[in-house]
Amino acid sequence: MKKVLVISVLVLAIVGSVLAGTLANYTVALDDVASGSVVGKEFIFMEDGTDTFQHDIKIAPTETVVWQFGVRNYNENLITETNLDYDLTFDVHATPGKSAINPLVVTIKDANGTVVASQAGTGVMEVKGSFPLSDIGQSAAYSVEIHWPGNDEVDMNYAGSQFGTTVNVSAVAKQVAVCQNETNPNPDPAQSNVAVKYEAGQVWAEGGTWDADAGALVGQTYKHKFRVTITNNSETAVQQWQLKFLFPEQIYQYWDAQMVSSDAGTGSYMFECPNDYNKVIPPGASITLGGLAVGKGDQPVTSVSVKDGVSGNNITAAVENVYRVNLP
C-alpha cells in the first residue's frame, strides 16, 4: 500500500527591493555644468502569469508532482529599460513542526525541459537568469518537479502526518553591472579593435547515485552550454582569426571552430577558424562559436587574445562575461 505523505508548498514570492514598478524613478540635479535633471530608467520585474503552486499536496512513493511558474521584465506596455539579472532561490526544508521527507528529489527545469538544478532531501538551490536589454518584453518559465523514487525499505520510515516538506521559491532582480570585464575594468567595445563576449547558458546535471545513508543524490556532474562572440570593431577585416583564453572548466564539445590546443592543467584553450567558412570577420561584423563544458557555467574566461592569422598581429580585445543566458 502506498504511504501518502503531505508536502506544503508556498506560493511563489517575488522578494527584495526590486518589485513590479520601477527600481528608481529618481531625479538628480546637475551641478554648475548645466541645469536640468536625470530620471532613472524603468526597472520592472514581475511574476509571469498565475503560478500553479498549491498547498498540502499529497505524494506517495514512485509518484511525481510538478508546478510551473515564470518571471518577466515587463508590465503591460512598460518594459525594463536596462539589462537585468535575476536570481531564483529554491529553499527545500522540513515543514514547520514536522520532519522532512528525505527521499524526495526536487528538480528545477527551464522552459526547454533542461535541468538547471536538482537535489535530494533538503537544501537550497539557486538558479540565475537574465533579460538582455530589448524593445520586446521577455519572460522565463520554470517548473519544479518533486519525485519520490520509491524504496520499500526506506519509505516505511516516512509514514504518518509527522512528515512534510516545504518548497519556498523566491526571486530577486538587479540591473546588470556596467562592468563585467575580468581583464579590463572599463571595456568599451565601440573603441576596442575586437570585442569578445562569453555567454554561459543552460546548466543541467547528469549521473549521480542515491546514497541511502545520506538520504541524498550524490556524485552528479554539472554541465552547461556556452557561446563566444567575436566582434570586429576595427576598419579592416580580421583574417583567419585565432582565439586564445583561460577557462577553468573543461570544454568537451565545440562547433563553428577548430580547437588547436587545450591544457587541462592551466585551463588554456586555443581555437581558430574552420577550414572552409568563418575565416574572415569583416569590419563591424561578428562570428560565433559554441560548445559544451563541464561545470555550472559560473566561471569567467580570462587572458583573452585574438590574432590575425595572415598578418600575425595580436588585436586588442575588450572582454565581457555573461552568465545564465538562454542560448538556442
Image (spheres, rainbow, N blue to C red):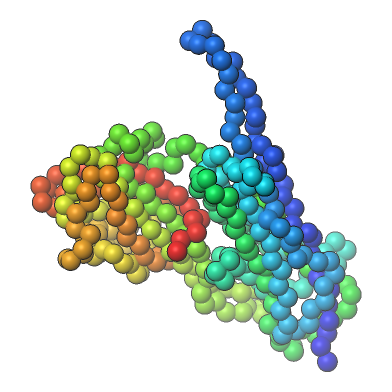
Name the residue: 55% across, 69% down: 112
User: Residue 58 versus residue 20: which sits nearer the camera?
Assistant: 20
Q: Quadrant of residue 94?
A: bottom right
Residue furthest to the top: 32
Q: Position of residue 73 (x, y in %)?
A: 61, 48
Residue 99 position, x and y percent, is 82, 69
Identify the residue at horizontal 74%, vertical 62% (top origin): 51
Q: Give the residue displayed 72% in from the left and 50% down from the top.
A: 14
Looking at the rendering, in which quadrant would you find the C terminus? bottom left
User: Is residue 69 placed above or below 194 in the rendered structure?
Assistant: below
Q: Quadrant of the N terminus?
A: bottom right
Q: Is residue 229 above or below residue 115?
A: above
Q: Position of residue 137 (x, y in %)?
A: 58, 50
Q: Which residue of the protein is positioned furthest toward the front in this rendering? A: 77
Residue 276 seen in the current view: yes
Residue 126: image quadrant is bottom right
Q: Which residue is drawn at the image coordinates 31% and 67% (left, top)? A: 255
Image coords of residue 180 (percent x, y)? 44, 41
